[in-house]
Image (spheres, rainbow, N blue to C red):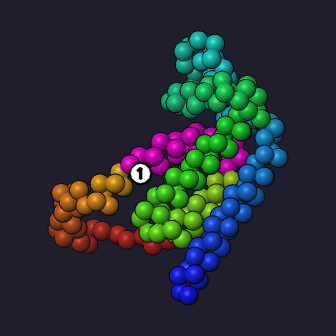
Amino acid sequence: MCEILNRGIQLCWWILLAVVIAVVVFIRIHLLAIPLERDEGEYAYAGQLMLQGIPPYRLAYNMKFPGVYAAYALIMSIFGESSAGIHFGLLIVNIANIAIVFLIARRLIGLIAGIAAAASYTILSASRSVLGLAAHATQFVMLPTLLGALVLLKPVLTKKMVFVSESLSAVITLFPSKIVLVVA
């Protein structure tokens, strides 16, 4: 009886996650054609130049690294050189990020925590406070960052990083007054 109740609760969490993702995808799909924001226009222009075979910084100068230009070039080559194509590419990247956040939290804490983390990331990533509807470099950087964190979890969870954890505990022991714990 208890196992049936647990499965029911897990099913409710999965349904909640599906609803949250569906709502955000629905919102993003209806806003695909919004005009490009200032930085998006810059990235799109540099991406277009890359698609034409012109290397970064030859005709467009900036202090940013060319990775976001390459991401834009890739997205525009697949989905078209339009604001809708760029925003659809952002949607795909965002869904991949949501899935990786789920996997990380599930491996670290558990299934329900993974679902809650994915739902939270879904809502936050579409928030105006982080310019979530604009395809900024931050959202593209999150994909390799989260993938790296996911890959690094395997040795941590299998206890193959004993040396690192023992070194960290030695530092904490030597300098306990310098350690600050932030609880949010």
Q: Is residue 180 above or below residue 103?
A: below
Residue 27 x, y percent position in the rendering = 78, 52
Is residue 133 part of the magenta span, yes or no? yes
**Structural crowding at the residue carrying mark 1, measured as other residues with C-alpha within 10 Å and reported as few (<14), some (14–19) or many (≥20):** few
Mark 1 residue type: Ala
Q: Which is more toward the observer, 35 or 151?
A: 151
Residue at horizontal 69%, vertical 53%? 126
Judge left or right: residue 33 versus residue 8: right
Residue at horizontal 56%, vertical 49%? 97
Question: Is residue 183 visible from the viewing direction of this image?
Answer: yes
Q: Is residue 49 above or below residue 31?
A: above
Residue 22 x, y percent position in the rendering = 73, 57
Q: Which is more toward the observer, 162 or 139?
A: 162
Judge left or right: residue 118 versus residue 131: left
Is residue 24 part of the magenta span, yes or no? no
Residue 82 x, y percent position in the rendering = 76, 28
Residue at horizontal 64%, vertical 42%? 92
Judge left or right: residue 74 versus residue 114: right
Q: Is residue 51 above or below residue 132?
A: above
Residue holding disc 1? 149
Residue at horizontal 18%, vertical 70%? 173
> Mark 1: which secondary structure?
helix
Quadrant of the frame with the N terminus: bottom right
Q: Which residues are magenta?
A: 132-151
* Count of numbered marks: 1
Q: Which is more toward the observer, 92 or 125?
A: 92
Residue 116 x, y percent position in the rendering = 58, 67
Question: Is residue 175 visible from the viewing direction of this image?
Answer: no
